[in-house]
Amino acid sequence: MPITPTEHIWMNGELVAWEDAKIHVLTHTLHYGTGVFEGVRAYETADGPAVFRLTDHMERLHRSARILMMDIPYTVEELVQATKDVVAASGLPSCYIRPIAYYGYGEMGLNTMPCSVDVAIACWPWGAYLGDDALTKGVKLKTSSWTRLDHNTMPPASKTTGNYVNSTLAKVEAVKAGYDEALMLNPQGFVSECTGENVFVARDGRFLTPPLASGALEGITQHSVMTIAKDLGIDVEVATIARSDVYLADEMFLCGTAAEVSAVNSVDDRPIACPGPMTTAIGEEYHKAIRGQTDRYKDWVEHVS
Ligand code: PPE
């Protein structure tokens, strides 16, 4: 999806002009995929733009770095303020936000211990990730021929840039085959997640979603949606999911910051009722929550000014 430039990007403590936010070609992370990043969204609310669960995203950025033994030179609070500054400077009512921490220029070789850590935060307008009608019409999934990466190879609980090679292989394969998204199985053959979304599968009136142990990222939208579901009286269990659970699903959806709540209409050409009633209820409530329209979720909405 093409990027529409805004005026500034936050880089190592300063707002720099968009076109000057450059790195050297010998930047460590460009060569070895050693960065950690986040995907965050700001939405228009009655009180101006607000970033959805910004503190939780910055805490996860720090957790991702911790797995890599990377020291991010900014606290969660500093990164929260920096994000608010860059969103405010953009003047955008809503946007996608991309914070990234990466090993910079100056060292080469696989030992990252001597490397400096640089941080950048950019924002730009970004529309629906899986299409405008993903919540109503749903998306078509194909089980990937690529296995989701494993805890003992590339820890999937860290949102590491290099991990997304696995995701891009699966995504391109699915799109070339005429599908919208790839469903990824872990090395044990159980469902982990999609290339950039967590998965919810309904069986017998309740939703199941895979745990971190199955290779899923601890999704912030996954957590929001579980809270919303419980508040709506819909049961959700964190559970190991077999491929057959998906083929027998009563309804299914994907969720993530970029994808929000996207219904699934088929997996491997087996139709799934779409959008299911529980998916619709959860999706509609999520859309209100992100815009600060539901009092009980007001703490999730972090105003820019
Ligand atoms: N799993 C993966 C692999 C993943 O990348 C994401 C977010 C999620 C689950 C959902 O996490 P959360 O956003 O906290 O609910 N994917 C981000 C990046 C997508 C991209 O194309 O880049 C996102 O949604 O922003």
Image: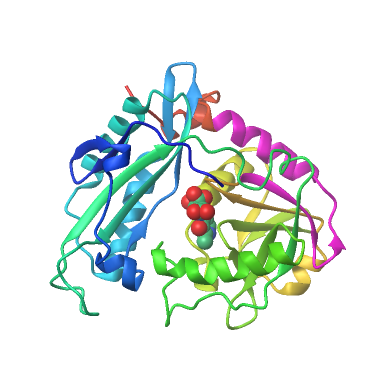
Residue 3 is situated, as x and y percent measured from the top left of the image, at: 48, 42
Q: Is residue 266 magenta?
A: yes
What is the residue that sits farthest to the top in this orientation?
46
Q: Quadrant of residue 24?
A: bottom left
Render colour scheme: rainbow
Q: Residue at x 71, y 57 (%)?
A: 180
Q: Residue at x 49, y 24 (%)?
A: 44
Q: In what quadrant of the picture does the C terminus appear? A: top left
When the figure is inspected, residue 176 is found, relative to residue 6, above or below; the finding is: below
State left or right for residue 155 relative to residue 226: left
Q: Of residues 92 and 6, which is closer to you in this image? A: 6
Q: Of residues 47 and 241, which is closer to you in this image? A: 47
State left or right for residue 89 relative to residue 117: right
Q: Quadrant of residue 201?
A: bottom right
Q: Residue at x 59, y 40 (%)?
A: 228
When the figure is inspected, residue 289 is found, relative to residue 131, above or below; the finding is: above
Q: Quadrant of residue 178?
A: bottom right
State left or right for residue 301 relative to residue 62: right
Residue 74 is situated, as x and y percent measured from the top left of the image, at: 19, 49
Residue 84 is situated, as x and y percent measured from the top left of the image, at: 31, 32
Q: Which residues are magenta?
A: 260-289
Q: Residue 48: tell me if it is visible.
A: yes
Q: Exactly how many numbered labels are in the figure? A: 0
Q: Is residue 234 magenta?
A: no
Q: Residue 240: tell me if it is visible.
A: no
